[in-house]
Image (cartoon, grey):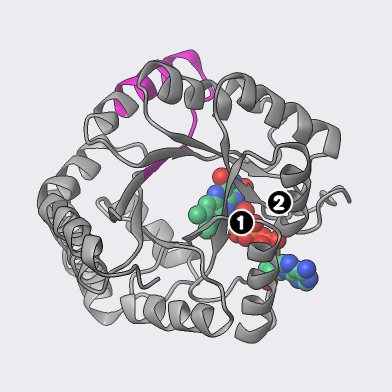
Amino acid sequence: MERLLSFEVFPANTNDGFVKLVETVKALSELKPSFISVTCSNNNQSIEQTTIKIANYIHNELGIETIAHLPAAYLSKAQVKRVIDTLANLGIHQVLALRGDHLPNLPPLTDFSYASELITFIKEIAPDFTISGACYPEVHPDSPNRVADIKTLKLKCDAGCNRLITQLFFDNELFYEFVERCQLAEIDVPIIAGIMPIVNRKQAIRLVQTTKTKLPRKFLAILEKYEHNPQALREAGLAYAVDQIVDLLTQDVAGVHLYTMNNASVAQHIHQQTAALFQIAASFDQSFPQKH
Ligand code: FAD
């Protein structure tokens, strides 16, 4: 089985933004990804005009598989059904089923308290949908501990989640430990590693200020040393991401999901640097069973 390479984009809110995004997804489609997923804001009342609009373009104009993200904490069952029906009518049968973050000062609705409840509901109304779910190698921030986090992840998979995509991480060892915990808990769906190449200062600053993700010494050194040299920061950030991906593929990861931040050139660079490794993994898999 081929190692999966997928890309994530976020939707545009304006017509100009949409035109630009179309160019981005066209360039991404030339890299023949397994799918392109489209994020969705968790209080998005106009998902048809944002996430679904570009997902439709990816699926029906470019002929590339697409996954619409669907955070449901602020959606009712009727709204979710409408979204699922719309996607199905467009020929899109894949979602990333999410709870979504709870917004400050805005209590969530009660139809979907957890992603697992959303997955159960989608399986009821659209059994042919392939459902991906989110997972967190460094533990979801709301979870009291790793054990509780893995137990609830197992519930999510038992509800019908077909594949997991991880939160971004910069330390592969944490990913491997997480995969092992999943195996112990008999979570046996493919776990796709989420990788975000850090290629500019704005991204780096936001990351350092807000993330709860472990930033390894080697990675922090890059951000610090090349902070004021855009070209050097870009090159070092891309090299770091390529290094992570080389290691993941060598360790037989089920796939890599690139958080592209709508930057096609980043995906192109990484694809160019790692394409042969994805192919080797594919031929290796023809004679050996998939590990993860
Ligand atoms: P859940 O799986 O429901 O888990 C949330 C918390 O509840 C966890 O702590 C879990 O351990 C706990 N829990 C789950 N089930 C139970 C239970 N039965 N009993 C008790 N506790 C339970 N957000 C967006 O708004 N839009 C996006 O497009 C988006 N895309 C994402 C893509 C990826 C790959 C990832 C990793 C995250 C994405 N997010 C997105 C962020 C995500 O919505 C948040 O992390 C959110 O806080 C959790 O969503 P979830 O689906 O993982 O929740």
Disc 1 marks a residue whose amino acid type is Cys
- Relative to residue 188, is residue 267 drawn left or right? left
Please say whether residue 61 is visible from this viewpoint: yes
Which residue is tagged 2?
119
Q: Which residues are magenta?
A: 7-24
Q: Nearer the viewer, residue 233 or 250?
A: 250
Query: Relative to residue 276, is residue 241 drawn left or right?
Result: right
Residue 290 falls left or right of residue 105: left
Q: Does label 2 point to a residue whose CB lies under 8 Å from ligand 1?
A: no
Residue indicated by mark 1: 161
Name the quadrant containing residue 282: bottom left
Residue sitting at 18 percent across and 50 percent down? 270
Residue 153 to residue 82: above or below: below
| The N terminus sits in image quarter | bottom left
State the image coordinates of residue 272 (x, y, percent, origin top left).
11, 46
Q: Position of residue 224 (x, y in %)?
A: 23, 69
* Residue located 22% across and 77% down the image: 218
